[in-house]
Amino acid sequence: MAKKKIRFVCQECGFDSPKWLGHCPGCGEWNTMVEEPVTDFSAKAKYMTPSKPLPVCDIDTSAVPRITTSLQEFDRVLGGGIVPGALILIGGDPGIGKSTLLLAVAGYLSQGSHVLYVSGEESLSQTRLRADRLGTLHKNLLIMTETNLDEVIAQALLLKPKLMVIDSIQTMFTPDVPSAPGSVGQVRESTAKLLRFAKESQIAVAIIGHVTKEGNIAGPRLLEHMVDVVLYFEGEKTNSFRILRAIKNRFGSTAESGIFSMEESGLTEVKNPSSFLLSERPHKAPGSVILAYLEGVRPLLIEIQALVSTTPYGMPRRMAAGFDYNRLILLMAVLEKRVGLLLGNQDAYVNAVGGIKIAEPAADLAVALAVASSFRNIALDNETVVVGEVGLTGEVRKVPRVDTRIREAAMLGFNKFIIPQGNLAGLKGFKQDIQVIGVETVDEALRVCTQ
């Protein structure tokens, strides 16, 4: 009897080895290598339909009509809607709203044709209760509780739905791979089957993927390379604000983002996120500064709050929520060295209101001014918007898309803008009541704000 071939695969990164390793060379984690049998796919390969090469001149390049949904924020991230035959992967933390989002999309599309929602984690009654809460009850929305992927694909070939949703890929298994559902081999082979099904049938497939403790989609990174679109649904569970980002998109831009709010009736689109984020802003409060932030290419107005107070202990504390901690330490050092603020005995707390995670350096000037405002206990002008990157010598550097940021803020009634001096030359076409001030240093920006 032939000896069964096995290999060892890391559950975190997908690194495989012919022998067991306590420490994974791929991701550096310990005790993540699991045993999996080696499957011979040569017998199945002969049943696959071979494709023939075509001259590049004969390939049809006509635009494929996209499937639009009622969620304009969802369509925006995808580049205008769902492309037939696309394989879409959506990841995010548990309980963030991935299933709620796709069930809402499925409910809208079911008004015109069949949509198949496959749940491997919930029963039929549980899915029905969630659909009832979301208001997506329709006869064309077909719910299936099955984990055998071959059975799922067989039903999809009979029904010919406009969209098939898999919730989630970690619960699916294929009998071709003799390992447990959720293992690296099962996830990889199941995704490969769904990819081939989507391309041959031209049925769009959306799959939900769980994330690891590092925030990556569970399974090897090869999973993200196999699909057409990778979306991440992000947000704090304690906050209703949700952001949908495209990490990979073969049919559109990865710079767009969708803004949602989690309410009792489900996910609600936020058509004007800047107004939503500034709705509870205090009036003339020290330490409060408005930042013109870019979420991809989409401008958002975010309130940056800072609280600086004398510490009763020998070691002052610095804390940042939604902003990089190391960047905060750097900015406080610049304020102390270049502006002359004595912050060595001060506790400092910085918060980006609304649960937004700020990742661009253009927020530096707003954070620095918020810290200085709180330290001096002087409120800045409520109608002022700030943007700019701060260098170690205290200079304010240029940032991209300043005109887009100003237009977004002007629509909400802001009329005073503090921007880097280097961005002034390219600005034109603004109303006369809009005051745009260019600054070269943090010290100059602080003087302008407190005038």
Image: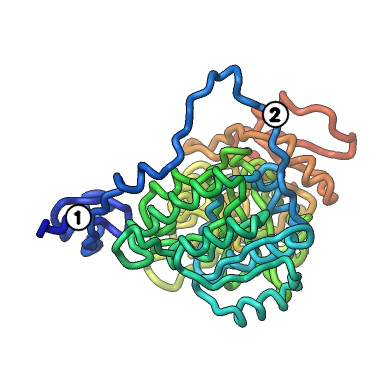
Q: Position of residue 355 (x, y in %)?
A: 60, 63
Give the residue number, with chain letter if any, for mark 2.
62
Q: Amino acid at mark 2?
A: Ser
Q: Is residue 183 visible?
A: yes
Q: Earlier in the sequence, mark 1 or mark 2?
A: 1
Residue 380 at x, y percent in the picture: 72, 54
Which corner quadrant of the image does residue 139 belong to?
bottom right
Residue shown at the point (66%, 77%) measured from the top left? 130
Instruction: Please indicate whether residue 347 sits to the left or right of residue 374 in the image.
Output: left
The spot of residue 369 in percent (x, y) is 62, 50
Q: Which residue is painted at 47% across and 33% down in the image?
A: 51
Mark on residue 302?
Answer: none
Identified at 51% across, 58% down, the residue is 91
Q: Residues within 10 Å of mark 1 (few under 14, many from 20)?
A: some
Residue farthest to the front? 47
Foreground residue among 26 and 324? 26
Badge 2 element: loop
Q: Looking at the picture, does residue 313 appear above or below residue 244?
A: below
Q: Position of residue 399 (x, y in %)?
A: 61, 35
Which corner quadrant holds the N terminus? bottom left
Residue position for label 1: 7
- Given residues 418 and 114, the one toward you in this image is 114
